[in-house]
Image (spheres, grey):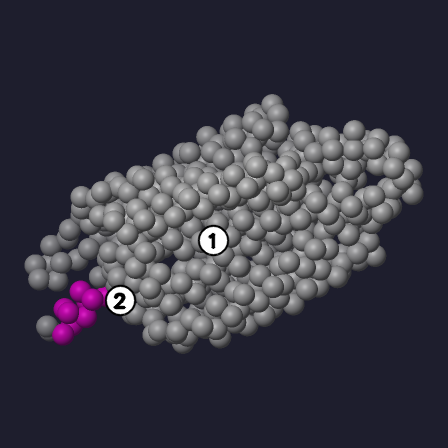
Amino acid sequence: MTAVASQAAGTTESSGLDRGVMAVFAGLMLGSLVASLNMTLVAPALPTIVAELGGLADYSWIPISAMLASTIVTPVAGKLSDVYGRKPLYMTGIVVFAVGSALSGLAPNFWFLVFARFVQGAGMGFIMPLSQAIIGDIISPRERGKYQGMMGASFGLASIIGPAAGGYITEHFTWRWLFFVNLPIAVLTLVVIWFFMHVPNERRPHKIDVWGSVTLSLGIAGTLLATVWGGVQYPWSSWQIIGLYAASAVLLAAFVWIERRAAEPVLPLQLWKSSIFTFSNIASVGVAMSMFGAIFFLPVFVQGVVGNSVTNSGAILVPMLVAMIVTSVLGGQLISRTGRYKVLLLVGLASMGVGYYMLSTFSVSTTNQQVIVAMVLLGLGLGACMQTYVLVVQNSVSRQDMAVATSATQLSRSIGAAVGLAVLGTILSQGMASSMARYLPASALAKLQASGGGATATAVFDPSQLARLPPAIELGIRHGLADALHPVFLVGVPIIAIAFVATALIKELPLRQTAHVTAGRQVARSTGAEESPLS
């Protein structure tokens, strides 16, 4: 009788745990959906947006502003959630993101849109790291692989819908609706989280590392500004660029000094003593740089060089994102079954490297089929890698470092995305000046630059302007844009190679099979009484 009762109690506890986990996980999936749509809906429309609001030379500012804000917020998100609770901070991120979406849809000019995207990015800076931290709290590392695989799949699912829907909305309505569609999803997410997400959180007094956060944020922002402006707005040797880099170096040095003395540093330097943490974050930077480079610059190639419509350019990203879903889900299941992850990461990076090399060989004669093959290879690799580095880091740290280590890994991803977009955008802007001159007469070049806000290639993104171009001029612009994009994609190959080497150096630890806390209703074994979790 005792054995039967014990077994029944264990079954009830397991069932309650599963229900609790899935209720929490539903809220996280919706939050991931909102953040994912932010990137994938807008990506194919960016050429259209810059053609209307600003020149192609400013193209990268729209994604960079969101990435920069996310980078600034991410380091403090985990620490603040320790003080105020995961759930309130997660909901705050959703609200801030929704406000940024509304402002983006109402943007009257280019720089207001950049500001609104900055607000959106601040919301993402809470959503993404806290979703990973919550998963790390309630699910054991051994089981976490399949849940993080499902999170990656939700990103991929939103990504499949996003590019095609984004292209269709832009072409048949207006790009402003790309931001407004986020609002009902955000409201639904808030409702689900408010009523169903119950996340235990051991709150304890904390000291917020204000000066560490300020110096890190300003140091990163200065580095990104110098990288984006260098060779475009100002010469590389100008006092503006040199001054920004010098100021950033001083700020980052001050950040290190502060972190070594802070009671509770925003980014504990001792984490970097772990080779697993260090190499995982180096690899995360490389994967993020290559991922966002493909998502945001491939539509430029497909629309500007191949000549596809906005709708088709969005649809052509779909094979990459379908492949991402497949390897994200299957890879997560494989990790949970075997407890091994390193080989999967290395194979994924190798696939990404081949895909990026293919992109670097594309020209005006490239077909949609060739683009799709490269996209599938990239997607297979991204699905295997994107969520796995977070798992690797979480498995190597203690409970008290879980949130800050997760935020640090998300910070690495945000820095990689922002720096990648800044570097690749600068390469594109500088390359266009010389490449266009090789294919266009000086008089035609000057006329197009005047009408395109300084960016000649915007003519091929604007149907009304394109219709007025002589065929020879249109072909010249396409050739010039293809030449300018060649080094953009070629740079991705050594970046992925560095990520591959860093991953090969990661020491593979066995995955723990216990979670730090329990989701939902907790069953007290000793008394049989139920405890209400903090939420």
Q: Is residue 514 left or right of residue 126?
A: left
Which numbered disc flags the more N-terminal residue, 2 or 1? 1
The image position of residue 23, as x and y in percent, is 34, 50
Q: Secondary structure at mark 1?
A: helix
Is residue 535 shown in magenta?
A: no
In the image shown, does 107 or 156 lie closer to the viewer? 107
The image position of residue 21, as x and y in percent, is 32, 55
Q: Is residue 309 left or right of residue 6?
A: right
Q: Quadrant of the N terminus?
A: bottom left
Q: Are marks 2 and 1 in contact (CB under 8 Å)?
A: no
Residue plotted at (46% across, 61% down): 282
416 to 15, vertically: above or below: above
- The residue tagged 1 is 413
In the image shown, does 225 or 160 lie closer to the viewer? 225
Residue plotted at (89% across, 34% down): 443
Instruction: State the separation of the CA atoms marked 2 and 1.
Output: 27 Å
Q: Is residue 299 left or right of residue 517?
A: right
Does the rendering let one see residue 193?
no
Magenta span of residues: 3-11
Does the rendering let one see residue 292?
yes
Numbered tag placed on residue 514 in the rendering: 2
Q: Residues within 10 Å of mark 1 (few under 14, many from 20)?
A: many
The image position of residue 70, as x and y in percent, is 45, 43
The image position of residue 297, as x and y in percent, is 66, 49
Q: Residues within 10 Å of mark 2 (few under 14, many from 20)?
A: few
Three-letter code for the amino acid on which mark 1 is drawn? Arg
Residue plotted at (38% across, 53% down): 408
